[in-house]
Amino acid sequence: MQKVKQLLMDHFNEDTLRAVVSNGRKKQLSKKILFRPFLEKDHLLFQREEYRGQQIFHKNMDKETAVERICRYLLEDYKQLDLQCQDRSFSVLVSKKGKSTIKEQRQQMIKKIELSHNRRKHYILETGQAIPFLVDLGVQTEDGRIVDKKYKKYKQINRFLEFIRDVLPELRQRQSSGKPLKIIDFGCGKSYLTFAVYYYLKIMQGIEVEMTGLDLKQDVIARCNGLAEKYGYGSLHFSQGDIGSYEGADQVDLVITLHACDTATDLALDKAVRWGAEVILSVPCCQHELNGQIRSELMAPVLRYGILKERFAALLTDALRAELLEQMGYEVQILEFIDMEHTPKNLLIRAVKKKIPGGSGSGQKSGKSQHRQEQYDRLCDALNTHGTLEQLLQSRKK
């Protein structure tokens, strides 16, 4: 163990990217423990990060303490240490008898990391201070701690708010007219995200909004309206109804649809386009429609396997939706919403209305649009697929 300690004393410093202790000797131990350097008032410290269940714990310590703690872990509870520096990495394996084997590997120089702050993950909705709707919806305790079983939900909420933060410039520009931002959340359910978006935009950012949550369940709508009234959220309302028949607006700035099942996503996207929404955030779910349509001799080796056909159809559905939104004047990205380990339904379609410049170049733009339309048509014809969103948008052109 003396060799390991000397290794850490020589290389565990401000040039360290991270040190990871792993491969526990007992099942109940944490899978891994991370150590990272940071500067606090010009003093080099190391932060230990450890997951226990759904909670994450941090502790800061000086170098000597961190080195002693890592050596103790390797002597008592763990078998492996991986130390990554800027220009090299070290792998350490420790036997039951304490014998250590160290392997060094040179690597291309990695850009020096920023040490001027503690690099703990900072969430938009921070812990430690209770937020009323998170408490009532069971995500937080009254003292601001995240409930263990709701930690994934807490991360999901903050991840979604990051998408909102990314489009704040477009939303602020839309609101520059002095009118409140009009927002609709289709299929809001228990409304974790509805309340979070309202809280972030209205309370944290000071943007005037008029927000509506729509869902089929009457009891859910009644509870959400009661909570909004309790918090004094006067411009947040919830209504019962389905996406297809909703006619409660003629212009909306931001449309949200989270896990609207199958073609319900298409109905929401169609309405968003019709309203001229500045931003669309959609997490599709249960893309069954094209799965029943696809026919292709060329793709037969893939389509004969049910699970592959289902996944291919889901990806194809979202790709075609994105292409149709591009054709309707949106800049579209398909992004990962949350980690695949939590749910396979993890893709988010983010569409932001393009700013159409005046002047020259319109002919070239038209030619490019025509080419993309031809690509879309060839793909759909080759696979025998024509989805609901395509039909809805075409019907509005007539």
Image (cartoon, grey):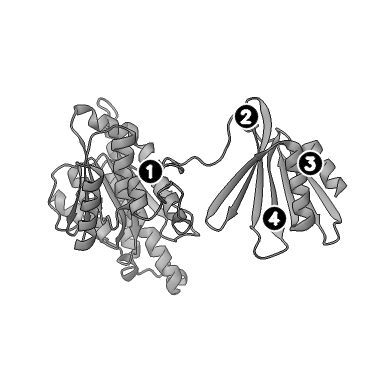
Mark 1, other Cα within 10 Å: few <14 / some 14–19 / many ≥20: some
Going by the numbered disc 4, the residue's amino acid type is: Ser
Q: Earlier in the sequence, mark 2 or mark 4?
A: 4
Q: Is residue 221 left or right of residue 64?
A: left
Measured from the top left, where is residue 294 in percent x and y?
Answer: 34, 68
Measured from the top left, where is residue 338 in percent x and y?
Answer: 45, 53
Residue sitting at 65 percent across and 47 percent down? 34
Q: Which mark is residue 40?
A: 2
Residue in the foreground of this view, choosing between 256 and 352 = 256
Q: Nearer the viewer, mark 2 or mark 4?
A: 2
Residue sitting at 30 percent across and 66 percent down? 289
Q: Earlier in the sequence, mark 2 or mark 1?
A: 2
Q: Earlier in the sequence, mark 1 or mark 4?
A: 4
Mark 2, other Cα within 10 Å: few <14 / some 14–19 / many ≥20: few
Q: Which mark is residue 8?
A: 3
Residue sitting at 35 percent across and 62 percent down? 382
Going by the numbered disc 3, the residue's amino acid type is: Leu
What is the spatial separation of the Cα atoms under label 1 and label 4, in whole angstroms? Answer: 32 Å
Residue under circle 4?
22
CB of mark 4 within 8 Å of CB of mark 3?
no
